[in-house]
Structures are given as C-alpha cells and as structure tokens.
Image (tube, coloured by chain):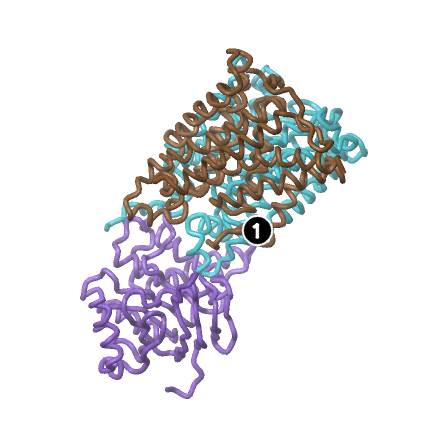
Chain colours: A brown, B purple, C cyan
Amino acid sequence: MTLFFQQLVNGIALGSVYALVALGLTLVYGVLKVPNFAHGALYTAGAYVAYVVLTGLGYPYVVAVVAAMAVVALLGAAMEWVVFRPLEGKSPVHAMIAALGVLFFLEGAADVIWGPDFRQVPTPLDGVVSVAGVNITEQRVLVVIAAIATMSGLYWLLKRTLVGMSIEAMAQDREGALLVGIDTRRVALITFAISGVLAAVAGSLIAPLVLVFPTMGAVIVLKAFVIVILGGMGSVPGAIVGGYLLALAETMAGTYVAFAFSELIAFALLVLVLVVKPTGLFAKGV
Amino acid sequence: MSAAPPLLRVERLGMSFGGLKAVNEVDLEVPAGKITAIIGPNGAGKTTFFNLVSGFHAPTEGRVVFDGEDVTGLPPHRMARRGVARTFQTTRLFPEASVLDNVIVGRRLHTRSNVFDAVFRSRRHRREDEESRVKALEALAATGTRDLADVPVANVSQEAGKRVAIALALATEPRLLLLDEPAAGINPHETDGLSTLIRSIVQRGVTVCLVEHKMRMVMDLSDHVAVLNYGRKIAEGTPAEIRGDPKVIDAYLGAEHA
Amino acid sequence: MSGSLASRLVPTALFVVAIVFPLAVDNPYLVSVVVTAYVTAIAVYGLDVLLGYTGQLSLAHAGFFGIGGYTVGVLTADHGFSFWTALPVALALTVALAHLIGLAALRTRHDYFAIFTLAVGVMIVIVIDRWAEVTGGTDGLIGIPPPPAIGPLRFDTLTTQYYLALAFLLLTIYVVWALVHSLVGRTFLAVRNSEDLARAVGIDAGRTHQLSFVISAALAGLGGSLYAVFLGYIGPAMGNVQMTFMMLVYLMIGGVASLAGPLVGTLLVMGLMQALQAFNEYQMMVLGPILVVVIIFFPHGLAGQGRRLAERLTVGRAGDAAAR
C-alpha cells in the first residue's frame, strides 16, 4: 500500500510538471491556432537557466527559478515577434515549419554552449519528508506547491485581469476580439511570454530531479501535445486535468505493469482519440 | 405543382449551432428542371440551408432526400458525386492556377485514373486527360469564358470569376446546381447576362436553385420561390404569389426596422 | 514540356555531367558524398510530393527512411536475402505501414496530423532502439552487403554504386514528374490550394491526403534502402526527427513543387556542410534560423524562385492573355 501512495505522490509531482508545460502549450495554441513545436525548448531553457544560476553563479534556488521565468518569458516573446508574427494568416504548415526551425536552433545552441552531456543540477532541498510511512523528497513537495501556486496565479490572470480576459476572448473568437478592439498582436506577444514563464517554472522545478540535456524537452512536449489534444485546444482545465491524469497513468502503469508500457500510453491515447474523435475530447467542434 | 417527383426534398430540416437554430423545421421541394429561388432577409439561414443540402454541414434535425435517396449527412464530395454542385457566396476558385486548370479539377470525379495510370501513362489516363480538357473547355464555353482558359485566376475580373466558378460547378455534370448569391456585386447589365446564362443551364436539363437578394432578377427568373426568415420557411409559391404575400413584406420590412 | 532550347539543353547537359562525373573526378570522398546526396534526395522528392504538392507536413518522414533501411539491412545482413529481393519487401512494408498510419489523414486537420506524425516518428525510433536483437539497438546494423551482381553488372564498387543510385534517382524524378503532370497530380494540387472547394467538386480530400502520404513514405523507404546498402550500415539516427528536419531544410532550400528542387537542395546543403566540416557542431544553430528565414520570406523555397511547377502547369505560353 505504501508503494501505491509513494507512486501516487510521484505521479502528482510529475503531473504538476506536465500540467505546467501543457498549459503553456494550450494557451499559445488557443491564441495562435498553430502548434508551437518549439515549446519543449522553452522548458529546456528554463532548466538550463536554473543550472547556470545555481552552479555557475551560485545564487539561491529562488533566484534561479525567477531568473528562468524572466529569461524564458523574453525568449517566448521573441519567438512570437520574430517568427510567428510574420507568418500570421499564412497556412499553418508554414508556422509549423518555422517552429521546427526555432526548436532545432535552440537545441543546437544548448548543444554548442553546454555540450550534449547530462548536467546535474544540485538540489536545494535534499531533505525527505515522511508522511504515514511514505517518503517524499522535499523537492517533490516544492514542485507540487510551486506548480499549484503558479496555476493559481495564471487563473487569477486569466479571469481577473484585462490581459487574461483578452487572451481567452482571442482564443475563442479571433475576429470577435478584433472587433471589440482587442490588440491581438499585443495579446499574442503576452501569451507567448506567459507560455515561456510556465515552461520555465516546470523546467527549473524539475531540473534538480532529472538530468539536464539539450533534447530533454522533446519527450515532454510530445506528451504535452497529447494532453492538449485530449483536453481540448486552448482549454486550461483540460490541460491541468489531462496533465495529472497522464502522469498518474504513466506512473501507475510503470510501477504495476512495465516501464516500457508507460511510454507508449501517451501515444496509444493519441491514436485512440484521433481515431474516435479527431477534434479532441473536449473540443467544441470546429 | 408538377406531377413529377421533386428532385430535392427536405423534410423538417434543422440546424442548431449551440442554442441558435439557423435552420428550423424547413419543408421544401425543389422541382426538377425548374428554377427555384430562396429569398429572405439577411441572416435568414439561406446559406446554411445550402450548406446542409450540399453536405458541408450535417443537419441536426430532419432529412435531405435527393432523387428519392436519403442523403442526409453525406459529406460534400459524396453529394457532388450524386449530382449536387454549388457555388459559394464569395467566389471560390483554386488560386495559383489558370481558369482551365480550375475547371479541369471539376472533371476529376468522372475519371478513374489512379497512380498507376499516371506513372505508366496508360491509355485510360491519356484518354481521360484529353477528355477532361475538352469537357472543361465546353463548360467554359457554356458560361462564355472559353477565351480566358489560360489566364491565371488572379487576373480575371470579378464578374468573369463568377462565371468561371459556375463553369467549374457545371463541369461536374450536376443534376442540381446551387447558386449562392450569384449576382452579388455585379452591375445590372451583367445581372441580365447572368439570368440568360442560368436559363441556358436549365435548358440543358440542370435544375437550378439559387439564393439571391436582387428581387427583379428573382422574380423574372424563377418558377418557384421559397422565403426564409429566422431559419423558418414563411412562404412558398410562384413569384406573383410571393410578391403580394403580406407575411413576406412584413419579414423584409421588419428586418429594415430591426 | 516547354519548347525553348535552353530548357532542353540544360537538363541534357546536367545529365551528361552526372554520367561522366565519377569517371572524370578522382576524389572518391566527393563521389561518395554525391551518392549519399542522391539517395537522400529520393526521400526528399517524397517529402515534396506530400508537402509541396499536397500541402501536408509529416514529421515521421525520416522514420520511413529508417524503416526502409533497416528492413533491407536486417534481411540482407542477418538473413541472407539479396538486395533485389529485400528491396520489394522493404517497399511493401513501408507502403503497408504508411497506409495504416495514413488512415489518420482521413479525418484530421493539418496541425493534428503533424503532431500525430511527430508521435509516430518518435515511436519508430523508440522501437528501433529497443528491439535491439533485430536492429542492433543504438549501435545500429553493420555489415550490410552491397547488392549482388546481375549478369555482367556489378554493384560493389563506388563507381557502380554511383550509377545505381543515379538510376534510381532518375526513376524517382520520372515518377514524380509523371505523377504531378497527371490527373492525380491535379487532385493533389487542388486539395493543397483549396481543400473545401476540392470537396465541393467531388474530390475525397481525406483519401487524397492518405494516398499522397503513402507515396511520400514509399519514396522515403526507397531512399533509405539504398542508403543502407551504400553505407553498409544503418543506425537509429537515420530515422529520427532531426533527419526529417534536415530533409525539410534540403527541400525548402531547393524549392518546393519543382522538379529540380529536392535534388538541388540536397546537393547544395550537403555539399556545403561537407565543405565546412569545421563548423559541424554549429550545424543546427545555423540551419534552424535559415529555415525560419526561408519559410518567412521564400515560402516556396529558395532556389527556383517563382518557377514553381504550379505556374508551369498553367500559365505556359499564354501569360500574355492576361488581358484583364
């Protein structure tokens, strides 16, 4: 039974990361209507910034996370401005190809700067908390708490600020948003910055728990795509619920069935959904 | 009404988008070989009606029966293969191609050549390739646009573009042609030309159903008129009957004062 | 084909150069680079059929390249097949898999399909990696034998393999040319240019996408099969997303929907990368932004600007009839 709770906790921690990455992706997808294949690189960038701040500069963890948020927010905004904005209105295939270009540029840059080797990020909290016989590393607790805090902040932003409401309006009906005077370009820029912040939080939070390397974002972004398609493009609750569900399914399957099987879950789900309901589970039709 | 069965019949046809009923319990029969017009104030559901009949939307209620066959919910390409062709409110043509190449695409559904025919240049392919070209030119000639054959569609005038779009639809050899506001944005002289064209199309045995706002054209041209308002059919009859119908006048006046 | 003398002369001259090349040049390394470019270009032609002519993006493209290569490799190196029997098997397998995976094309939008193919591509590499008893895992397969002789024709030297690769390349170019200049090609273009309108005139857009996908995969599989026997080796890196990205770069630089584009792009970029070997580690950093710049400013590709096949097919000699 303790194994179950142990894995439950692991699944929740993992789900927090998945949810954050999926949230960033779904926001941009909702506003842009195009998948940002470079999103995984934002996550990776967050991890590397944390790495540099912690090991290279020796600042405390909080600084690392905040620095990651700032740097990657700028990176995301730059992506929108330089790459996606010129392709506005063109066929989505162009934007997808451009996103690939950005992805490989960023991965290549990481490879050049830090090399392909795995990097270790020192964990700031190496304590272990024991609850009812279950051992939880403090870092994992931090991951969950920080993720929830970030998601709450995002919720507040989306529902209570003008910017957030503009994002939701634009995601639902771009023409309508234009008609009521929303500056769609500014909103797009901000959305990309926010997606960068979310990805950076995820990357910098998970960095002490995993190894950092240039292509670390590849697998997670694929899972984020599955989550976003399952939960519905542009759906915030869909990304959160989907993220936790997928992580739990993977963790439990990995423990009780077989590790190899857990990797295929995301893919199997994707195939299933696309075959049964190609518009996604919670999509409101076209 | 004629004794012959109608080419198209819709029964209690309905389309709901969320809470909005764009088309609401419409019963309509389109007689074969005649010109039927569908009129109504803006937003009455006329284009949605066309989308339902041509397969671009599946209706949420009701049935579509074409030539005795229940075709409700069939996708657009299947409807085209059964003989329902349409034009669009904003003229749609294949960009980056010539007029002739546009209309040749309309012949594809009558060809059977596949990849192997293409790669091995089979006799069937050569025959169908030539046939497609010839028949496409015929369709262009029928709409008076044959001499524009090699012109890129981007360089063609708006009025000529509409005729090319009609030629494209005709190339599929339809039995029912749905024209969505074919006279929008063209001058009276061009409108007369369009009416003549439509009459010649009907003379070839194609049933025409059109959505139009230009009343004079509708009244002159149509054998049969149906009026939609807020998604419902409020009147139906000959042009003369419709002209005097108080419900129809009300609908248009009401729309003006709305 | 256009009747102008220049447009007949240039391809003929190039053909002569291609035939004479390995005999005239005394640099085996250079020849092997060109052979690699030829077989990779075959796959890029496949990508062009799907992306350039039908407007669909597949991120699993290199995966089929890998499947072709591994099938031939495993059958010839480990099971004693001859290349000539392994090749049809590899193609059949690739076509069957692509047909199955292409079912997703029947019902999904372009962006969803791209994501789906990304997942497929990753899965293919994972399977190759894990199924080590058959594929050699991350180490790959070595000792793939060259094709056995057919009568007096041998294929075990660099020069003979060059001609083999050239022959298949020319065959590919012919197949693509024939396809594009056919009713099937018109269907692809129609679906690319306006899918809804194509549907309205009776074209089954979903099946068209699926067919285009299968053809593109088959050409990728052919390229991969040749690549494996030429190199004598195949590894998982030949089938991953990075490889698909490289093929995209080759295509975009050479020009989409053009007959020479895939070959020109592959030769050019591969050649440049070989020449600038010292900058190999900066490869991705440079090619990424180049791809972005090209797609923004030259969406139909760099070389062959403004001479896309779609225009060739239609405007012809009557461009001046554009009276309006």
Among all residues in the image, which is located at the extreme right?
C79
**Location of residue B161 in the rendering, given as x and y in whole percent from the top left corner:** 30, 57
> Where is residue B232 drawn, in percent x and y?
36, 73
The residue singled out by tag 1 in the image is B115
Identify the image quadrant of residue C18.
top right
Q: Is residue B187 above or below residue C147?
A: below
- In this rendering, the answer to whether B67 lies above or below C46 is below
Which corner quadrant holds the N terminus of chain A? top right
Would residue C105 appear left or right of B156 to someone viewing this image?
right
Secondary structure of the residue carrying numbered label 1 = helix
Q: Nearer the viewer, residue C83 or B29?
A: B29
Q: Is residue A110 above or below residue C225?
A: above
Whether residue C14 is visible, yes or no, is no
User: Dividing the picture into quarters, in which one does residue A241 lie?
Assistant: top right
- Pick whichever, A15 or A224, lies toward us: A15
**In this view, B126 is above or below C15:** below
Tell which of A95 and C307 is nearer to you: A95
Furthest residue toward front = A132
Q: Residue at x 48, y 19 (%)?
A: A63
Q: Give the quadrant of residue A209.
A: top right
Residue C192: image location, x then y, percent: 45, 48
Whether residue C47 is visible here, answered yes or no, is yes
Image position of B114 (left or right of A173): right
Q: Name the residue at 59% across, 15% down.
A: C27
Q: Amino acid at mark 1?
A: Val
Left or right position of B170 against C114: left
